[in-house]
Amino acid sequence: MSRKLPESELILNADGSVYHLHLKPENLASLVFTVGDPDRVSLVSKYFDSIDFKTQKREFVTHTGKIGGKKITVISTGMGTDNIEILMTELDALVNVDLKTRLVKPQHTKLQIIRLGTSGAMQENIPVGSLLASDKAIGLDTLMQFYPELAGSQEWGYYLKEKMSLGFTPYQTAASELLLKRLNDDFLKGITLTCPGFYGPQGREIRLKPKLDQMIERLSELEIGGNRLSNFEMETAGYYAMGELLGHEMLSLNAIVANRITGEFDKKAEKTVDNLIHTALKLFMKK
């Protein structure tokens, strides 16, 4: 028999919804799109045929509706893998825990969760304005120091630890093969580096000089089996790792709005993000 989850572990609001997301099971579709920016939720839901539910708590904004009779949810997450850990844990609880009895359900339910995010390229041949799917992701954050070991190869993690002289081992994880197969030639595929910050951890110097000199240039030259790191952002590795451990299908899709090697920023970034949203919905809402 499964353990009854204490109120202090799985916190619910007074209406019975999960604490941070403020959702009940009936508010959630099995296909979930996520965005970082709360203002971007409406940029996704404007393509819905109907919006049947809306809620907001902190940075977590949710719209659930339908496209062609198929139920769909879009949620904003804020930035960073700490927020992704909250999101993934509570989404999983909505489908795999009986919130009334606080018992884990005997039958596991699998969600399909697709991130629609912005990212910077770290290879000169990945142009701004392009769309990129994260085939693999490497986490420079320490989230997985607190969870069970991941099953797949960790060669990139050990390699980066050595090359960057880190005091911990980054973790490596991968996208859902099922979801990757749904993509078309609109998407490049690459290896995404997930960073625990926007400035120093991504090699930006404003008033503080990053500890790692010429970080982006050095990272862009690293290679395993002919493969190089393609881009970086702040969430993908956390998504993939939590998805693997909790048993959900995960995919991160990126609008490339900057190229850190050429120094270029996408002057049509809003149009690129809209193209990502429209392309993803067209692909994944097909019957």
Image (cartoon, grey):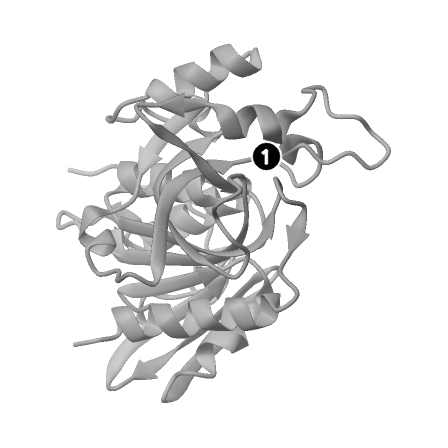
Quarter holding residue 158: top left
Q: Residue 232, percent across and down? A: 52, 41
Answer yes or no: is residue 259 visible: yes
Answer yes or no: is residue 6 visible: no
- Extreme residue in the bottom direction: 49
Q: Residue 47, percent across and down? A: 42, 83
User: Seen in the image, is 236 located left or right of residue 141?
Assistant: left
Residue at image point 40% right, 44% down: 239
User: Seen in the image, is 113 located left or right of residue 86?
Assistant: left
Q: Which residue is mark 1?
A: 196
Q: Residue 72, percent across and down? A: 33, 73
Residue at image point 70% right, 20% down: 213
In the picture, the quarter occupied by the C terminus is bottom left
Q: Residues within 10 Å of mark 1 (few under 14, many from 20)?
A: many
Q: Between residues 87 and 4, which one lies in front from this camera angle? A: 87
* Residue 262 sits above or below residue 36 on the image: above
* Residue 192 sits above or below residue 105 on the image: above
* Residue 63 sits above or below residue 101 on the image: below
Q: Residue 6, percent across and down? A: 39, 41
Residue at image point 50% right, 37% down: 194
Check disc 1 and report its element: helix, strand or loop: loop
Residue at image point 25% right, 37% down: 3
User: Seen in the image, is 59 located left or right of residue 116?
Assistant: right
The residue type indicated by label 1 comes to: Pro
- Extreme residue in the right direction: 207
Q: Between residues 53 and 165, which one lies in front from this camera angle? A: 165
Quarter holding residue 196: top right
